[in-house]
Image (cartoon, rainbow, N blue to C red):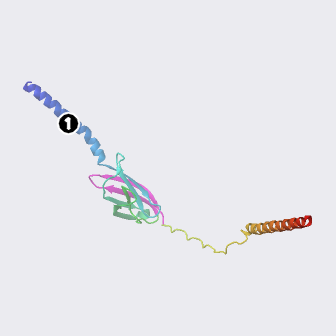
Amino acid sequence: MSVTGIRKVLAAVLVGLALTLFSAAPAAAQADKLKLTVAGDGAEGVTIQAVYADGRRLDQVVRLVLTATGPDGQKVGPVQLEPQPEGQGFYSSGPVLSAGKWKVTVKSPAPLQSEATATVQARVAQSPPVPAPVAVTAPDRTAGAGAGWWPFAAAGLVLVAAAMGVAMLFGRRRTGTQND
């Protein structure tokens, strides 16, 4: 093989390698982005679900920072969010907002740089209702009253059977003594 042929083969290999690397670069750049879903927690806090942009679950801890602007221009943040045990990629702020409508922004720094903004309606935290007192009553004795008749009926049947047996026994003896 000549030197020119070797150069052509080497150039083709390098071009193929370069094309492979450049075509993989957008996928790698996509994997370096996060999709952040921001929502209210039903009270005075915010929840965030973080996944990779391609939908894979987050497999590392990411430093998320929350800022919020509320009614009357109130500001909250920056608040650094910690991952919660509820699930992989799940973050929660805890009670940081007061009641009202808030514009919440959550950012993650490089290398997984991302940002999401949502409107959240914060409400005053509700206490669970106090259970109503339960009245303690004596057991109802009339519920089983109908079930108490059978022992008396059984005893009556036993007495009737015994009386018949005695009558039959004495009846045979009389007939037996008269024939002798």
Residue holding disc 1: 18
Is residue 81 left or right of 7 when viewed as pictured? right
Query: Where 50 falls versus 171 (above or below)?
Result: above
Is residue 118 left or right of 153 when viewed as pictured? left
Query: Which quadrant of the structure image shows residue 89?
Result: bottom left
Q: Residue type at mark 1: give it.
A: Ala
Residue 123 point in image, percent of width and height: 48, 64
Residue 47 point in image, percent of width and height: 41, 58
Which quadrant is home to the N terminus? Answer: top left
Query: Which quadrant of the structure image shows residue 93?
Result: bottom left
SS at circle 1: helix
Query: Which quadrant of the structure image shows residue 103?
Result: bottom left
Query: Where 141 falls versus 83 (above or below)?
Result: below
Q: Is residue 76 magenta?
A: no
Which quadrant is home to the C terminus? Answer: bottom right
Name the residue rendered at 10%, 28% in the picture: 6
Residue 82 point in image, percent of width and height: 34, 62
Name the residue rendered at 31%, 49% in the picture: 33
Residue 74 point in image, percent of width and height: 40, 65
Is residue 41 left or right of 158 when viewed as pictured? left
Residue 90 or residue 134, whichever sits in front: 134
Query: Where 76 falls versus 11 (above or below)?
Result: below
* Boundaries of the magenta span: 100-124
Residue extending farthest left: 3
Instruction: Give neighbour class at mark 1: few <14, some 14-19, many 20+ (Cα, 10 Å).
Output: few
Look at the magenta stretch and give its main secondary structure: strand
Q: Is residue 113 magenta?
A: yes
Name the residue rendered at 28%, 45% in the picture: 29
Query: Where 86 falls versus 31 (above or below)?
Result: below
